[in-house]
Image (cartoon, rainbow, N blue to C red):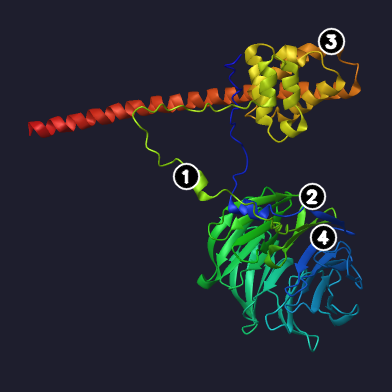
Amino acid sequence: MAGYKPVAIQAYPVLGEKITQDTLYWNNYKTPVQIKEFGAVSKVDFSLQPPYNYAVTASSRIHIYGRYSQEPIKTFSRFKDTAYCATFRQDGKLLVAGSEDGGIQLFDISGRAPLRQFEGHTKAVHTVDFTADKYHVVSGADDYTVKLWDIPNSKEILTFKEHSDYVRCGCASKLNPDLFVTGSYDHTVKMFDARTNQSVISVEHGQPVESVLLFPSGGLLVSAGGRYIKVWDMLKGGQLLVSLKNHHKTVTCLCLSSSGQRLLSGSLDRKVKVYSTSSYKVVHSFDYAASILSLALAHEDETIVVGMTNGILSVKHRKSEAKKDSLPRRRRPAYRTFIKGKNYMKQQDDILINRPSKKHLELYDRDLKNFRISKALDRVLEPSCAIKTPEITVSIIKELNRRGVLANALAGRDEKEISRVLNFLIRNLSQPRFAPVLINAAEIIIDIYLPVIGQSPVVDKKFLLLQGLVEKEIDYQRELLETLGMMDMLFATMTSKESPSLLQHNASDGFLENKKIES
């Protein structure tokens, strides 16, 4: 056995998400912190100033959270009915909120009682925002109206009645205090100018509009409604640039990253998707437990907060970069130690003797070399190997099967050992790269341990689960083979249809050439 050849560990291609810079960036968040609110979280808004607190609107309360706190640091609850929206002013000192009774209230973050109250809407207010000059508030409500309010005087300045259905979203320009945008269930998005008392641009989204977002430069507008996200060029009068349809259900919220290079969208399909604003392709996505209603990003994307229909607030904080401990450098050999003898020229009578390199075998290879097949299988089924490097475990199972001793290695195991084998098969059987090897191993286990079913409830449960997985995987492969056969038949039919036309084309070309030669 001096010439034992170690088991070749097959390098299986890893199927799944391609690792990109966006993947590394957006996966660099800690485990989410979940906070239970009193109702569906309809709005989340971050303050633009330190310490970057955020306001959460749920039911009849507005909670102010510190960026790293799990308990609200302040609560505003003086609403007659459900509150739907709350937005910070640019300096983070004031907060404006709209409620179901049509009222709008202005709060000072340092106090609790409202500073101002605006009465004018007759139905629920779903969108409020501060204009760029910080002294006016824009609101949209279910009474089909959009209103502009003056904060110092608590008076209504303008009313726009151009929408024909509920106004559910809106935002103000960050540069021009006279421009603001609203979206309505009448499928339109309108940009209003306070100087003209009417809308200056109107675009047709095609679905009830749930959210609008104006880029900081004011040149691009994003609207979301239905399954569609549309980007409009406002400098060209509202020309449609791109239409995206990457969600399976209604898109409810939009958000822009701090750099402005990534657009985020949340949907009722429980996913948050990240788009590149240069190509408008999906570069990353997050999965959540419930339908998403609201979404917000903190300064420098340090925190991402998602509000869901079940009242859960999911908060993810970015991982801090761990500083490497500066260890004292170990003194290394001098440079002359490495180059010693390098320049020696071989003489004619010299004999070159190569030192044989000693090969170190892995523990499972040593067991296989000494025919300890069960022990070799036990080594690769340990969690440190089976979870981190399952390809090694699959390669050993494949080698045992090649030698014809896989059944001997799997037989005679107690409850703990067979549970470890069943756990590995259940975890990896559905992976296409391991399926051919593991299906065979699963069938061998079923044949060996079927007569002793009923002696252990734990093993029985896993055994039935494994049996169902094997049958399901075999059905999948059968369906794939049938689909492949249908595709081959279609391709063959297309080829047979193209070949006569090619022959006729070649014949006509030859006839024309003969005519030219005769002439």
For marks 2 and 1, give the one nearer the viewer.
1
For marks 4 and 3, give the one nearer the viewer.
3
- Residue identified by numbered label 2: 290
Amino acid under label 4?
Val
- Residue identified by numbered label 3: 451
Circle 3: element type: helix
Please identify the quarter of the rendering in which residue 328 is found: bottom right
For marks 3 and 2, give the one nearer the viewer.
3
For marks 3 and 1, give the one nearer the viewer.
1
Q: Rate crowding at label 4 as few (under 14), some (14 to 19) or many (20 or more) other CA atoms within 10 Å.
A: many
Which mark identifies residue 41? 4
Task: Give how far across and how far down residue 93 sits, in percent.
Answer: 79, 79
Marks 1/4: CA–CA distance: 69 Å
For marks 1 and 4, give the one nearer the viewer.
1
Which mark identifies residue 339? 1
Marks 3/1: CA–CA distance: 68 Å
Amino acid under label 3?
Pro
Amino acid under label 1?
Ile
Along the viewing direction, whichever of 259 and 483 lies nearer the viewer: 259
The residue depicted at 80 percent of the width and 76 percent of the height is: 96
